[in-house]
Image (tube, helix red, strand yellow):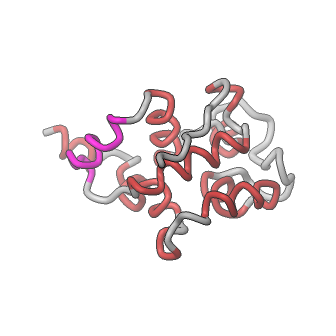
Amino acid sequence: MATELWRRSPRYQRTNQIVPDLPRASYFKSIARLPRKQTSIITQLITGHAPLNKHLHRIGKSASPICPSCHEHEETVAHFLLYCPAHQAMRQLMMADVLDEERNLRGLLATDGNRKQLLNFVARTTRFRSVFGHIAEIPDQD
C-alpha cells in the first residue's frame, strides 16, 4: 500500500532517477546509520527540498532563485554539487575519491561509498550553515 502511494507521488519520478527502486530496505538501512543531520542533508538533496535558492524561491523564502555564490545560474542541487564555479576547489576535493562513472547526482547521492565525500563538500562550502549550523567534516578512518 505505501509503495503504491509513493509511486503515485509527484516526487517519485525525480527521486527514482537518483535513488532507483525506493522504497528499498538496503538504502534505508545504510542511511539510518548516519547522524540525523547528515541523513536530513542527503534526503533534502535527493528530493530537491534543500536550502538552495531555487527551492527557497519557489516556497517564498528567497527573493531570487539565482546562486548567491556565483550569481550566474539558478541554484539547483545539480548546480550546487556539480557546476557552481564558486565551489570548484571544494568540488575537486570531493571528486578526488569518487569514481569517474559516479561523478553525477545519482553517483554522489545514492552511492554509500560517496556519502563521506558529499557531506564533507557540503560542510566545506558552509552553504547550509543557516539551516543546519556548523557541519563537521567526517574524518578519515585509517
Q: Quadrant of residue 88?
A: bottom right
Farthest left residue in view? 1
Q: Is residue 23 magenta?
A: yes
Image vertical order of residue 132 relative to residue 4, above or below: above
Residue reaching furthest to the front: 142
Task: Say left or right for 107 vs 94.
Answer: left
Query: Residue at coordinates 72% horizontally, 54% vertically from top-left?
Result: 90
Coordinates of residue 41 in the picture (x, y in percent)? 52, 37
Considering every residue shown, the one lying at the far bottom of the view is: 100
Query: Which quadrant holds the N terminus?
Result: top left
Whole-percent x and y of residue 62? 75, 34
Foreground residue among 84 and 16: 84
Count of labels in the image: 0
In front of the other: 128 or 119: 119
What main secondary structure does the magenta stretch of the protein show? helix
Name which quarter of the figure residue 87 lies in. Answer: bottom right
What are the residue bounds of the magenta stretch? 22-33
Residue 89 image point, x, y percent: 77, 59
Q: Is 17 on the left-hand or right-hand side of 108? A: left
**Residue at 45%, 62% in the rendered image:** 106
**Residue at image coords 42%, 58%:** 18
Q: Is residue 6 above or below residue 60?
A: below
Name the residue at 65% across, 52% down. Answer: 76
Residue 137 is inside the magenta segment: no
Farthest residue toward the right? 71
Q: Is residue 88 above or below residue 57?
A: below
